[in-house]
Image (cartoon, grey):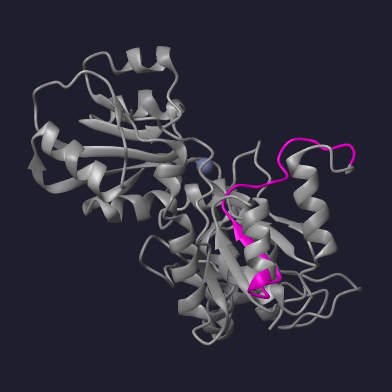
Amino acid sequence: MTIEKVLAVLEKLAPPAYQEEYDNAKLLTGNRAAICTGVLCCLDITDEVLEEAIQHNCNLIVAHHPILFGGIKSITGASYVEKILIKAIKSDIALYAIHTNLDNVIQGVNNHIAGKLNLINCKILVPQKNTLAKLITYVPKEAASAVLDALFKSGAGHIGEYSEASFSMPGTGTFKGSDKTNPHIGVKGVREVVAEEKIEVLIPVHLQNSILKALFEAHPYEEVAYDLVPLLNTNQWVGSGLIGYLADPLEEVAFLRKLKKEFNLSIIKHTTLLGKPIEKIALCGGSGSFLIPAAKNAGADIFITADIKYHAFFDAASEMIIADIGHWESEQYVPEQLFAVLTSNFPNFAVLKSTVNTNPVHYFLG
Ligand SMILES: [Zn+2]
């Protein structure tokens, strides 16, 4: 099996196109075409994790955090990042990062955190914009079904849990080919009138090229008429943070206890308790300060995230509780999630989950 085959599964779950602009989620070292000897899933790539991969003969490490993030102008081994890159390349280990793209898909990092807290009716907190388009095309009646099949197969027509969603309408098309044409129906130089179907499908913008290629291949005309319309609709399945509900509301302290237990936390940094039950929960694995206004607007009782700065805690403004559980702690189950996805796709392949605790932060509890 190639590294490409493993990455194809990950990129179907979390298309790289959905990563944030500042991010660097991709294959960082190595070759997609190389044979994969085994995969190690982790949160951070450290020297210990690299050693673990070498020991278990895994030549692909899939990490949440991209080790190569900012610009790098020399690779001399002066920093820990450079040391790891040199060691990975020398050991012929491919490094792959699946970062904010995994944060942003509805079945990603935040969904896994929500699962640990048994949240229900989860939705993306801030859905992404400009990721959807409408493709409209006109097809002679007898070819409509084959064109629809090709569009669906290439990724068009997905709406949430529904696939193969489309709208068709019968109508009449006309055309007249020049001397240089070879029309599929009729003859050149004569206006042709044809019974056609107008087909409309929703497409994810990042699949536009492959969907159009499929359309052109399946459509019988030599000139395919189509409209690609950008949509103002937000994408309900892609975006930042998640909001969901507890089936049974909990008193604040009881909820914090549950959170502490499920995530095995030493401490939770939080704002003033408000004396009301916790039912609506917003969350974001990793650094989620930027979502405080959205969580508040959505009416969350509590916002669970990490890396909250002192002044940002004031933004809770007695309207909700902000709980900072620690960056590593909030994302500690990502390797388990990646492991589950890969083993379900490749049940007989060597997929491992790192046993190294890469948290660089320790708490002195006296
Ligand atoms: Zn993170």
53 sits to left or right of 12:
right
Q: Nearer the viewer, residue 275 or 153?
A: 275
77 sits to left or right of 283:
right
Callout count: 0
Q: Nearer the viewer, residue 357 or 119?
A: 357
Q: Quadrant of residue 360?
A: top right
Q: Is residue 195 magenta?
A: no
User: Where residue 321 sits: x, y (%)?
Assistant: 24, 25
242 sits to left or right of 288:
left
Which residue appears farthest toward the front when viewing the image?
366
From this view, report whether residue 92 is shown above or below residue 19: below
Type of secondary structure dominating the magenta stretch: loop
From this view, report whether residue 11 is shown above or below residue 349: above
158 sits to left or right of 140:
left
Q: Quadrant of residue 241?
A: top left
User: Where residue 98 sits: x, y (%)?
Assistant: 59, 54
What residue lies at 22% left-to-right and 51% top-to-bottom? 119
Q: Nearer the viewer, residue 70 or 165?
A: 70
What residue lies at 47% left-to-right and 53% top-to-bottom? 105
Q: Which residues are magenta?
A: 55-74
Q: Quadrant of residue 160?
A: bottom left
What residue lies at 57% left-to-right and 73% top-to-bottom? 151
From this view, report whether residue 273 is shown above or below residue 51: above
User: Where residue 231 sits: x, y (%)?
Assistant: 52, 45
Can the viewer see residue 169?
A: no
